[in-house]
């Protein structure tokens, strides 16, 4: 078979394998749907274990500012995660900067919490374990949904998309956990609330190249 014949055969094979696909919605619409699904799920589980003083906390500008900054950061970084799954769609540096800045400010605002010096290791872990479990369990489903949504696109920078997916997910889970935790102490918040957000970004980034890779058939 001559070279032109091989090329023609290859083109014919590729054309024969083409299947119609439905065009994905815009990243903004997909983000909005993901946020609605995640918020609904978190509201259901968090309502059962809400902290006793939640009404008074929701009246505190300081508490609300912390949660608003985390939600804003998670939403903006989630938007960039969806954009990262669109080939040729450049990530917007302004949105990335705003998202990371909001996240940093929210976690920084948390650092205003008081420090207790009377912790024992047993009491520290006893109070912290429920928050760790909530972070793991409550964040699992929104993260899986987000990863599946990203796989429907074609994320070329899969590690970056994985980092954005992880931090976006646990940034919006953070306020739900805060509304259920009775402890407003800096060491507890740092280890059992803030650390999962950062660790999720690392873990999701490491898993991104594997989970976001599209299977290719020979």
Image (cartoon, rainbow, N blue to C red):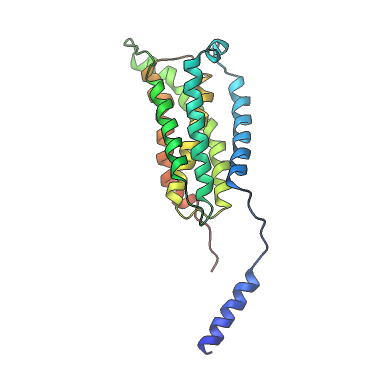
Whether residue 32 is visible, yes or no, is: yes
Residue 201 position in % (x across, y down): 43, 39
Is residue 19 depicted above or below 54 in this figure?
below
Residue 206 position in % (x across, y down): 41, 46
Q: Is residue 186 left or right of residue 43?
A: left
* Count of numbered labels shown in the rendering: 0
Is residue 47 depicted above or below 197 in this figure?
above
Whether residue 204 is visible, yes or no, is: no
Residue 5 position in % (x across, y down): 56, 86
Residue 139 position in % (x across, y down): 52, 33
Is residue 113 depicted above or below 71 in this figure?
above
Viewer-side residue, 99 vs 120: 99
Q: Could you tell me which residue is drawn at 42 percent across and 36 percent down?
A: 100
Is residue 163 depicted above or below 218 in this figure?
above
Q: Quadrant of residue 8?
A: bottom right
Q: Quadrant of residue 58?
A: top right
Viewer-side residue, 171 vs 95: 95
As drawn, the residue found furthest toward the bottom would be 2
As drawn, the residue found furthest toward the left would be 117
Q: Could you tell me which residue is drawn at 52 percent across and 40 percent down?
A: 78
Q: Could you tell me which residue is drawn at 49 percent across and 41 percent down?
A: 165
Q: Could you tell me which residue is drawn at 36 percent across and 19 percent down?
A: 187
Q: Is residue 202 left or right of residue 7?
A: left
């Amino acid at each position: 078979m001559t070279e032109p014949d091989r090329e023609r055969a290859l083109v014919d094979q590729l054309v024969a394998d083409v299947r119609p696909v439905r065009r994905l919605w815009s990243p903004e619409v997909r983000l909005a749907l993901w946020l609605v699904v995640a918020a609904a799920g978190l509201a259901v589980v968090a309502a059962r274990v809400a902290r006793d003083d939640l009404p008074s906390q929701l009246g505190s500008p300081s508490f609300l500012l912390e949660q608003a900054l985390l939600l804003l950061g998670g939403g903006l970084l989630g938007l960039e995660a969806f954009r990262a799954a669109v080939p040729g769609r450049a990530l917007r540096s302004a949105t990335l900067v705003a998202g990371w800045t909001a996240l940093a400010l929210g976690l920084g605002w948390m650092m205003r919490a008081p420090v207790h010096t009377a912790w024992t290791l047993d009491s520290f872990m006893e109070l912290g374990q429920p928050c760790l479990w909530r972070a793991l369990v409550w964040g699992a489903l929104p993260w899986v949904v987000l990863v599946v949504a990203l796989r429907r696109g074609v994320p070329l920078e899969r590690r970056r998309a994985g980092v954005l997916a992880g931090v976006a997910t646990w940034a919006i889970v953070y306020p739900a956990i805060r509304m259920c935790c009775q402890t407003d102490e800096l060491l507890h918040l740092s280890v059992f609330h803030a650390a999962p957000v950062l660790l999720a970004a690392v873990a999701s980034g490491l898993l991104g190249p594997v989970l976001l890779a599209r299977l290719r058939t020979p």
